[in-house]
Image: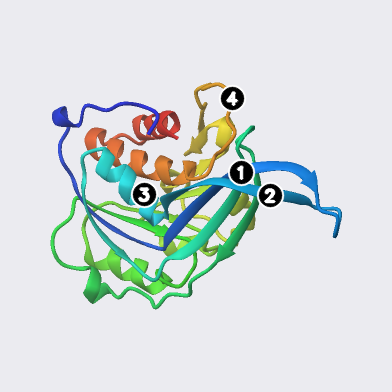
C-alpha cells in the first residue's frame, strides 16, 4: 500500500475472499552479454523475492488495512519474472497456470460477512453460477474483479475491470456498478473519471489492480460512497 492508514481508528471488517491464488517469484539479475548460441541476452540471476499474487495479494492488502479475511482459493499458479536489477524493468515472465476445481456456494457460506470479494483470473476457481448464487442468497456488498466477459451475468455486484478487459467484454453491467481502471490515468465510475496521483517514476505495476480492489472495498465499507472509495483506491494503487 502506498498510503499509511491508521486502522486502529477504522472499523474492522470481516471479508470473504474467493479467487485464484498465485506464487509470484521475482528473480533479479544482470544482462552483460549476448549468447554466442543465438542473438539473445544472457540473464545472470542475483537474488529472488517471493510474494503472494492474484487473490493472495488482495488478501494481504485487505489484512494490511485491518480487515479479517477468510480466503478460499484453488491450487496456486506460479509466475516467475526475470527483472533487470539495474533498471528494475521486467525482461521476461514465465507462467505455470494451475487449473482449479470451482469453489461451491456451500463451501463459501456461512458465516456472516461485511462484504464478499471475488478475484477471478479465470483459472476455474470462480464460476458465473457461484457469483449468481451469492447475489441471490447473501445480502452484503459483492465486489468482483474478473477476466470473464459476460458481465451482465454479474448484476448486483460491483465489477472492477481494467480498460483492456472492458474492450474484450461482450456485455457490461449498469454504469453505477462498473469501475474501470486506466493505470496512470486513474479510474472511471458512473460517467465520472477520477485522476490518479503522480507518484514519480513507476517501473513495476505488478499487483496494482489487486491493491486497487482491496482499497476500494475497504473505503466503500467505511464511507458508503463509491466516489470516496475510487479516490482512495487510486491513491493506494
Task: State which tag comes first along the sequence, 4 or 2.
Answer: 2
Q: Nearer the viewer, mark 3 or mark 2?
A: 2
Look at mark 3 in the image and give the residue it sits on. 58
Q: Residues within 10 Å of mark 4 (few under 14, many from 20)?
A: few
Query: What's the CA distance linking mark 3 and mark 2?
Result: 31 Å
Residue 216 percent across, percent down from the top left = 36, 40
Quadrant position of the C terminus in the picture: top left
Task: State which tag comes first along the sequence, 2 or 1.
Answer: 1
Q: At x 23% / y 35%, what residue is drawn? A: 222
Q: Residues within 10 Å of mark 3 (few under 14, many from 20)?
A: many
Look at mark 2 in the image and give the residue it sits on. 43
Query: What's the CA distance linking mark 1 and mark 3?
Result: 27 Å
Look at mark 1 in the image and give the residue it sits on. 29
Q: At x 32% / y 47%, what residue is drawn? A: 60
- Report whether 54 appears left or right of 113: right
Residue 145 percent across, percent down from the top left = 44, 53
Residue 69 percent across, percent down from the top left = 22, 53
Task: State which tag comes first along the sequence, 3 or 2.
Answer: 2
Look at mark 4 in the image and give the residue it sits on. 201
- Report whether 127 appears left or right of 184: left
Above or below, 90 relative to 73: above
Amino acid at each position: 500500500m502506498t498510503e499509511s492508514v491508521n486502522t486502529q481508528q477504522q472499523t474492522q471488517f470481516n471479508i470473504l475472499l474467493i479467487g485464484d491464488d498465485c506464487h509470484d517469484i521475482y528473480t533479479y539479475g544482470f544482462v552483460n552479454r549476448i549468447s554466442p548460441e543465438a542473438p539473445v541476452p544472457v540473464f545472470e540471476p542475483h537474488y529472488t523475492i517471493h510474494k503472494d499474487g492474484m487473490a493472495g495479494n488482495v488478501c494481504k492488502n485487505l489484512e494490511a488495512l485491518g480487515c479479517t479475511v477468510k480466503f478460499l482459493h484453488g491450487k496456486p499458479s506460479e509466475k516467475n519474472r526475470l527483472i533487470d536489477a539495474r533498471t528494475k524493468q521486467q525482461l521476461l515472465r514465465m507462467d505455470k497456470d494451475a487449473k482449479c476445481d470451482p469453489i461451491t456456494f456451500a463451501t463459501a457460506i456461512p458465516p456472516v460477512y461485511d462484504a464478499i470479494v471475488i478475484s477471478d483470473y479465470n483459472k476455474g476457481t470462480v464460476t458465473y453460477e457461484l457469483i449468481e448464487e451469492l447475489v441471490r442468497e447473501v445480502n452484503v456488498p459483492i465486489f468482483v474483479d474478473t477476466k470473464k466477459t459476460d458481465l451482465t451475468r454479474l448484476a448486483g455486484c460491483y465489477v472492477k475491470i481494467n480498460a483492456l478487459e472492458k474492450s474484450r467484454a461482450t456485455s457490461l453491467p449498469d454504469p453505477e456498478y462498473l469501475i474501470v481502471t486506466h493505470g496512470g490515468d486513474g479510474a472511471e465510475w458512473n460517467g465520472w473519471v477520477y485522476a490518479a496521483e503522480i507518484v514519480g517514476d513507476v517501473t513495476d505495476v505488478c499487483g496494482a489492480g489487486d491493491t486497487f480492489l482491496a482499497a476500494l472495498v475497504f473505503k466503500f465499507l467505511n464511507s458508503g460512497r463509491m466516489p470516496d472509495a475510487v479516490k482512495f483506491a487510486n491513491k493506494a494503487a
